[in-house]
Image (tube, grey):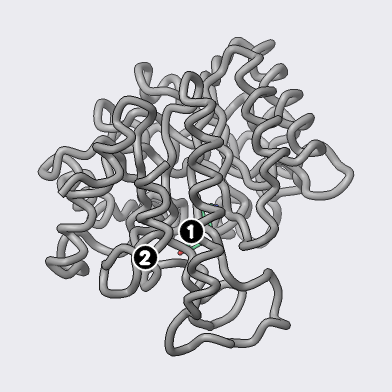
Amino acid sequence: MTGLREKFAEAFDIGVSLGGRLPDDYTPAEIALIDAQFSVVTPENCMKPNAIQPREGEFTFAQADALVAFAAAHNKRMTGHCLVWHEVCPAWFFLDGEAPASRELVLARMRTHIHTLAGRYRGHLMGWDVVNEALDDDDGYLRDTAWRRAIGDDYLVQAYRLAREADPDCDLYYNDYGNEMPAKREKTLRLLAELADAGIAVPAVGIQGHWVLDQVPFDEIDAAITTFAATGRRVMITELDLSILPWGKSAGNPYPDGCPAEILARQAEQYAALFRLFLRHRDVITRVAFWNPHDGRSWLNSFPYNRTNYPLLFDRQCQPKPAYAAVMAV
Ligand code: 9MR
């Protein structure tokens, strides 16, 4: 069966994030789906700070090692996600006993974490999401995070330098959500320029692509890709999904037993429009990655509250949805 990865092979890689332990936590149907459809794997959670170093000096690599081995055995390339993030980062990174840790201590811990993690997988990864989601959602420039409070605004430069030391050959990415919109787009350009001034090359920008049905900002996505590409960088869609439920709690759980055909049809149209847009930018887009392989594995079933969502191209039985046929037909 020709899948997404073959269909789009000449244009860009098709990626997927995988959670849990590979292959043990996956059914044969899921493994077959991954084999057929995707060419690049992103670890959904197992390389995050809480997973890798829950307590200082206690590194837990079993799940990440298993994923790297799975990717190698199944001919997938891999990206690393993520070295520094304000979420799921254990409090110990920022504490000295009960007191806030000094800049020097937090920098030393950042160094140990990045060197140990990126050093271990050196040679196995195409690139790393180095600092994830560092830009403020509101009027500010940089997000107010524990890393920034402890180290200062140069924590980004420090993290990228450490990543470069630990893995001299892989790409260093900047990955965020909402950076297709004008405000974060501008902040992204500023950050990339500041990193460049510090001698750090970031050759590719990740636009996550967590979008909502009927609210996909097509024109902004188009403009963002053009804007980032105009700086000579490549663009990656790193965490694509198309939720059929709006953000927030108000939506309840309207479709616990199946998604209405009319909604699936609209989702198919909008996915196809997205891929037409991506193909127009195929000269600068290197990867389009889905966040999870099929609806049953989506993070959107439990965030921001438990409900049944249908955001991907494959259903809970790993069968193609109308959106899959629409994307394959573009
Ligand atoms: O899908 C991930 C979910 O399983 C985790 O609980 C959560 C916190 O670690 O992170 C989710 O993935 C996020 C990704 O790492 C960064 N961009 C937003 C993703 C969805 O929240």
For image coordinates 58% across by 39% down, the residue present is 207
Residue 214 vs residue 121, the one in the foreground: 214
Residue 124 vs residue 271, the one in the foreground: 271
At label 1, counting other C-alpha atoms closer than 10 Å, the crowd grade (few under 14, some 14-19, many 20 or more) is: many
Q: Is residue 71 above or below residue 96?
A: above
* Disc 1 CB within 8 Å of nearest ligand 1 atom: no
* Disc 2 CB within 8 Å of nearest ligand 1 atom: no
Q: Which mark is residue 44?
A: none
Name the amino acid, label 1: Ala
Residue 325: quarter of image = bottom left
For image coordinates 19% across by 49% down, the residue present is 36
Q: Is any part of residue 7 visible from this angle?
A: yes
Name the amino acid, label 2: Lys
Q: Is residue 41 left or right of residue 249?
A: left
Q: Mark 2 and mark 1: span between their CA atoms?
A: 8 Å
For image coordinates 30% across by 55% down, the residue present is 60
Mark nearer the N terminus (2 vs 1): 1
Asked if the residue at tag 1 contacts the one at tag 2, i.e. Cβ–Cβ closer than 8 Å, the answer is yes
Q: At which x and y percent is residue 298?
A: 43, 67
Q: Which mark is residue 268?
A: 1
At label 2, counting other C-alpha atoms closer than 10 Å, the crowd grade (few under 14, some 14-19, many 20 or more) is: many
Residue 276 vs residue 144, the one in the foreground: 276
Q: At which x and y percent is residue 173?
A: 51, 29
Q: At which x and y percent is residue 28?
A: 12, 66
Q: At which x and y percent is residue 191?
A: 71, 26
Residue hosting label 2: 321
Residue 15: quarter of image = top left
Residue 229 vs residue 83, the one in the foreground: 229
